[in-house]
Amino acid sequence: MQPQLIEFYANAACEIGYLARPAGEGIGAGVVVVQEWWGLDVHIKSIADRFAKAGFVALAPDFYRGQIAKEPDEARKLAMELQYPQAQAVMQGAVNYLLGQPFVQPNKVGIVGFCMGGRLSSIFATTSQNLSAAVAFYGVPPLSDEQAASITAPILAIYGETDSGFPPSVIEENNRKLTDAGKVHEIIVYPGAPHAFFNDTRPNIYNKEAADNAWERTVAWFEQYLK
């Protein structure tokens, strides 16, 4: 089925998202795709399309309501203007929308985010309702003991080794806290890979080998916990 822009409700308002469904009858488990700080751009839409080809119903909310940043300063401004409680409500609205659709079968939804979206997704996993799996690309912030204990779904955290924003100490401490809390989780660090290594629209940072493996692991994670 052809991808399309759809409307769903969150924050007592109408939100917009990019919906991609599998070919044929378009039936599959649901995945919410959370954008980088650039916005709902070609890259994020292409990820939703890839999930549809893999047999999932993917919904990418537009947190910036049509705005797409071209330069880092512009992206930083948009990201700083985004209110986290509002973003959390948008993600919950996207989950609720997918769970309410007859073409989302089995009736389970996961979430995946990249960069800013990885942070949003991992925080959402501590407060969400009806979430069955989570994947965070280079975005899980240092978790408190309370946040680790509040994780509501199996979580896969993916990092690049040379990403200065997430030093080994942060990754190791998150792993310890999730383990101590008894949460189902996995942490993967790709040797030599930088921040945002999955973004194939940015040749200066894209790492194909790491990206291909991370995609396989992400799909396998969702197949395990959603299907």
Image: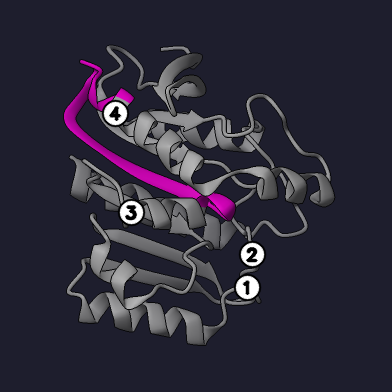
Give the quadrant of the N terminus.
top left
In the displayed structure image, the side of residue 195 where residue 158 appears, left or right: left
| Bounds of the magenta segment | 97-117
Establish if 85 lies above or below 185.
above
Q: Earlier in the sequence, mark 3 or mark 4?
A: 4
Depth-wise, is mark 2 or mark 1 nearer the camera? Answer: 1
Residue pointed to by mark 4: 96
Secondary structure found at label 3:
loop
* Residue 200 in view in this figure: no
Residue pointed to by mark 1: 165
Q: What kind of residue is marked 4?
A: Asn
Secondary structure found at label 4:
helix
Secondary structure found at label 1:
loop
Residue found 33% across the figure and 52% down from its top: 134
Residue pointed to by mark 2: 195
Q: Residues within 10 Å of mark 2 (few under 14, many from 20)?
A: many
Real-space Cα distance between discs 3 and 1? Answer: 21 Å
* Residue 135 in view in this figure: yes
Q: Is 121 in front, or is 137?
A: 121
Q: Is residue 40 magenta?
A: no
Q: What kind of residue is marked 1?
A: Gly
Name the mark on residue 145: none
Real-space Cα distance between discs 2 and 1? Answer: 8 Å
In the displayed structure image, the side of residue 115 where residue 68 appears, left or right: right
Name the mark on residue 125: 3
Q: Residues within 10 Å of mark 4 (few under 14, many from 20)?
A: some
Q: Is 19 in front, or is 67?
A: 67
